[in-house]
């Protein structure tokens, strides 16, 4: 008998309901150690008048992302995102984390903790980073 045809049963602790076929008791995705906080959830859309509509919870979560946010665009190519995140947090996020998302065409979404920080940033510009003008 060749090595490729030898069936090796899985240990009993790793089988599903004592299944002797070696079916693992955990899904393969569990090998990646995904925590509950990082699990993706699916919320089905609502059907309204023959069309689809996102549920209220999804709409509210999307709106919350933009609540205290600024959209900015660099005049030239932006610096690497990790460098930009470090600089933004050092300057604008002294007490809290400021989140920076790269959108498209040199545009950024900068999520700030509150309206006061947004106003301070807008009042104290213009902002030049790495000799590159950031329009807000």
Image (cartoon, helix red, strand yellow):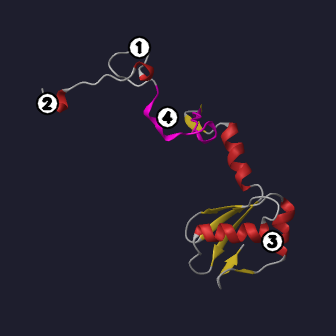
Badge 4: few (under 14), some or many (20 or more) residues near its Cα, within 10 Å? few
**Residue closest to the eye, 73 or 100:** 100
In the image, residue 46 sits, relative to residue 126, either above or below, namely above
Task: Give the quarter of the image for residue 105.
Answer: bottom right
Rendered residue at 31%/22% (across/down): 9
In the image, which residues are magenta? 26-46
Check the picture and name the quadrant holding the C terminus: bottom right
47 left or right of 58 in image: left
Q: Which mark is residue 78?
A: none
Q: Earlier in the sequence, mark 2 or mark 4?
A: 2
Q: Earlier in the sequence, mark 1 or mark 2?
A: 2
Badge 1: few (under 14), some or many (20 or more) residues near its Cα, within 10 Å? few
Q: Which mark is residue 2?
A: 2
**Residue closest to the eye, 5 or 49:** 5
Q: Which of labels 4 and 1 is toward the front?
A: 1
20 left or right of 111 in image: left
């Amino acid at each position: 008998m060749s090595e490729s045809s030898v069936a090796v049963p899985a240990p009993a602790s790793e089988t599903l309901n004592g299944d002797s076929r070696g079916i693992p008791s955990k899904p393969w995705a569990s090998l990646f150690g995904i925590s509950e906080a990082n699990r993706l959830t699916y919320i089905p859309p609502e059907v309204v008048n023959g069309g689809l509509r996102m549920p209220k919870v999804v709409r509210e979560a999307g709106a919350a992302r933009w609540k205290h946010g600024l959209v900015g665009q660099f005049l030239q190519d932006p610096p690497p995102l990790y460098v930009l995140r470090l600089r933004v947090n050092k300057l604008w996020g002294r007490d809290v984390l400021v989140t920076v998302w790269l959108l498209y065409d040199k545009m950024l979404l900068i999520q700030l903790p509150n309206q006061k920080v947004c106003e301070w940033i807008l009042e104290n510009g213009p902002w030049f980073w790495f000799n590159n003008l950031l329009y807000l």
